[in-house]
Amino acid sequence: MGFFGNHVANQGKHTITTVIAEGCVLNGNCRVNSDMQIDGELEGNVECKSTVIISCSGKVVGEITADKVMINGYFDGQITANIVEILPQGKAHGVVFSDNLCIERGGSFFGETHASKPGQQNLLLTDELQPNNVAELSQAK
């Protein structure tokens, strides 16, 4: 069967990933709720409630705010994330605000690291835990 077939392996898998394809050049800001993979070039700011992946062909110049950022391409700017991973082909320049930074052998980072900004975890909450829903959850207990 094809890609959209009713195969058992396809059922229940509703993951969405926003992809900026290789060869694509974007100038501007992005705000996404799903994972984001950057194979092309992006100049601007990214706000992501999930994971941002900069692949080996990807290049980002700007600011990223996300739950997790994985860099295997080129990044120049500022990252605010709970988890930052610089993979073997990753090159990162700039400022990182995170309490969990991992640089794998071969990866490089030039810049400054700082602990998470105060209230950073609150900025990265999913839609399920926004303030109006938190009150409903606490009343249900």
Image (cartoon, rainbow, N blue to C red):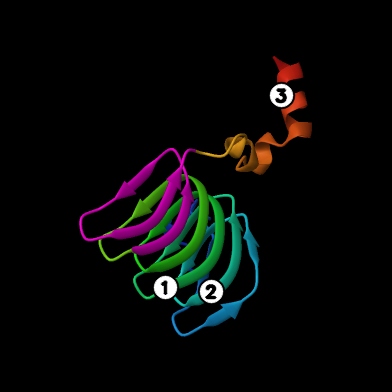
Q: Are marks 1 and 2 in contact (CB under 8 Å)?
A: yes
Q: Residue 124, position in %: x, y? A: 60, 43
Question: Horizontal and vertical percent for residue 25?
Answer: 53, 82
Instruction: Give the mark nearest the N terminus, 2 or 3.
Output: 2
Q: Main secondary structure of the magenta part?
A: strand
Q: Residue at x 64, y 42 (%)?
A: 123
Question: Does the image show residue 3?
Answer: no
Quadrant for the N terminus in the image: bottom left
Residue 117 image offset from top left, x and y in percent: 57, 39
Residue that badge 3 annotates: 137
**Label 3 near label 1: C-beta < 8 Å?**
no
Quarter of the image where the C terminus is located: top right
Which of marks 2 and 1 precedes in the sequence?
A: 2
Q: Earlier in the sequence, mark 1 or mark 3?
A: 1
Residue shown at 51% from the left, 83% from the top? 24
Pick the residue in front: 77 or 125.
Answer: 77
Please tell me whether residue 21 belongs to the stretch shown in magenta.
no
Callout 3, which amino acid? Answer: Leu
Name the residue beneath numbered marker 2. 42
| Callouts 2 and 3 close, C-beta under 8 Å | no
Q: Position of residue 17 (x, y in %)?
A: 52, 62
Determine the secondary structure under disc 1: loop
Label annotation for residue 113: none
- The circle on residue 58 is 1
- Kindly tell me whether residue 12 is visible in this rendering: yes
Spatial CA span between label 1 and label 3: 40 Å
Residue range in magenta is 91-115
Q: How many marks?
A: 3
**Badge 2 element:** strand
